[in-house]
């Protein structure tokens, strides 16, 4: 089992240090563990859900210490990132360059709309914001910086009903993933969150099954991760995500980090 999406206490909404996740991963039979806390940003933007920029050396050191302590486990260093053009050089030259990160995840938690940044988990309430999210996500994918896209179906948290607009935007995302050859993540964290009650019934925030059903129409690869925010969840719901991939005959991506 492999998990490429893991957070630490530094993001302020997770618990545990890197060594705690590594220890739990070994006990749960995980062979590859990617540590991908929410990236710090050079201007300390969105600081409520990420480490400050001056914490970056400590983050890198904590991963190095865990790698030394648990040589039997492949521990990778990464970060989950929101894309903006002003951060492109920071991601490319500093995280992937100077700090030698193994990979970056595209995490579309915010998106620009009418001159401001909105939150993907709370502000996608109409077809206009759904389309803005979609456009931003695809533009971010086109940057070429990211190994895969985290929870692309995040829009389903507040855009509750599947309709012609969700299908159209989903197809745009899926087509971009095919064209750009970038895997999409079936994210297990949504299965551990409170379920949503909609007119159509009760469902997880994500994964949103209609999105992944559409995915079988495209030549794409998927990756399944727990998106662990607690050490005990380091392998959680990966089997559920793999079952979704199997249900819709989706190909699992393989990485050579």
Image (tube, rainbow, N blue to C red):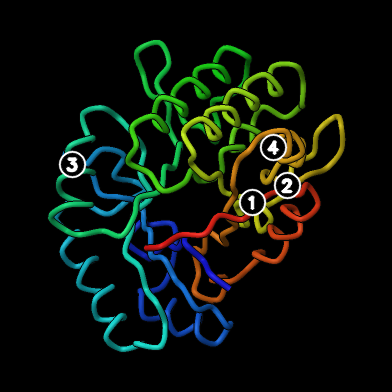
| Residue that badge 4 annotates | 215
SS at circle 3: helix
Q: Which dot, 3 or 4, sits closer to the camera?
A: 4
Q: CA distance from mark 3 to mark 4?
A: 32 Å
Q: Which mark is residue 190?
A: 1
Identify which residue is drawn at 20% across, 59% down.
100
Q: CA distance from mark 1 to mark 3?
A: 29 Å
| Residue that badge 2 annotates | 204
Figure quadrant of the N terminus: bottom right
x and y percentages locating residue 202 in the rendered image: 83, 43
Q: CA distance from mark 1 to mark 4?
A: 18 Å
Characterize the local packing of mark 3: few (<14), some (14-19) or many (20 or more) Cα atoms within 10 angstroms.
some
Q: Which dot, 3 or 2, sits closer to the camera?
A: 3
Q: Which badge, 3 or 4, comes first in the chain's sequence?
A: 3
SS at circle 4: helix
Q: Which badge, 1 or 4, comes first in the chain's sequence?
A: 1
Task: Please say if the residues under marks 2 and 4 sit with CB atoms less than 8 Å apart.
Answer: no
Q: CA distance from mark 3 to mark 2?
A: 34 Å
Of residues 18 and 148, the one drawn nearer to the viewer in this rendering: 148
Q: Which badge, 3 or 2, comes first in the chain's sequence?
A: 3
Q: Which badge, 2 or 4, comes first in the chain's sequence?
A: 2
x and y percentages locating residue 131 in the rendered image: 55, 17
Identify which residue is drawn at 77% across, 20% down.
163
| Residue that badge 3 annotates | 90
Characterize the local packing of mark 2: few (<14), some (14-19) or many (20 or more) Cα atoms within 10 angstroms.
some
Identify which residue is drawn at 62% across, 37% down.
153
Q: Which dot, 1 or 3, sits closer to the camera?
A: 3
> Residue 103, relative to residue 114: is it above or below?
below
Task: Please say if the residues under marks 1 and 2 sit with CB atoms less than 8 Å apart.
Answer: yes
Task: Please say if the residues under marks 1 and 3 sit with CB atoms less than 8 Å apart.
Answer: no
């Amino acid at each position: 089992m492999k998990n490429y999406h893991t957070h630490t206490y530094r993001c302020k909404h997770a618990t545990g240090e890197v060594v705690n996740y590594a220890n739990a991963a070994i006990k749960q039979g995980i062979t590859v563990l990617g540590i991908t806390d929410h990236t710090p940003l050079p201007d300390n933007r969105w600081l409520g859900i990420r480490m400050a920029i001056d914490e970056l050396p400590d983050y890198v050191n904590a991963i190095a210490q865990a790698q030394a302590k648990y040589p039997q486990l492949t521990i990778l260093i990464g970060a989950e990132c929101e894309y903006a053009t002003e951060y492109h050089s920071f991601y490319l030259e500093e995280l992937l360059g100077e700090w030698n990160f193994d990979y970056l995840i595209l995490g579309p938690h915010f998106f620009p709309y009418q001159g401001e940044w909105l939150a993907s988990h709370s502000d996608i309430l109409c077809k206009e914001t759904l389309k803005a999210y979609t456009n931003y996500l695809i533009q971010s994918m086109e940057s070429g910086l990211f190994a895969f896209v985290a929870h692309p179906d995040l829009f389903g948290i507040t855009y509750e009903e599947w309709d012609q607009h969700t299908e159209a935007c989903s197809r745009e995302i899926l087509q971009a993933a095919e064209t750009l050859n970038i895997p999409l993540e079936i994210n297990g964290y949504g299965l551990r969150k409170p379920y949503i009650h909609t007119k159509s019934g009760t469902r997880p925030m994500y994964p949103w099954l209609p999105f992944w059903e559409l995915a079988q129409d495209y030549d794409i690869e998927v990756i399944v991760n727990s998106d662990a925010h607690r050490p005990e969840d380091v392998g959680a719901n990966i089997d559920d995500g793999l079952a979704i991939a199997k249900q819709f005959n989706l190909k699992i991506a393989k990485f050579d980090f």
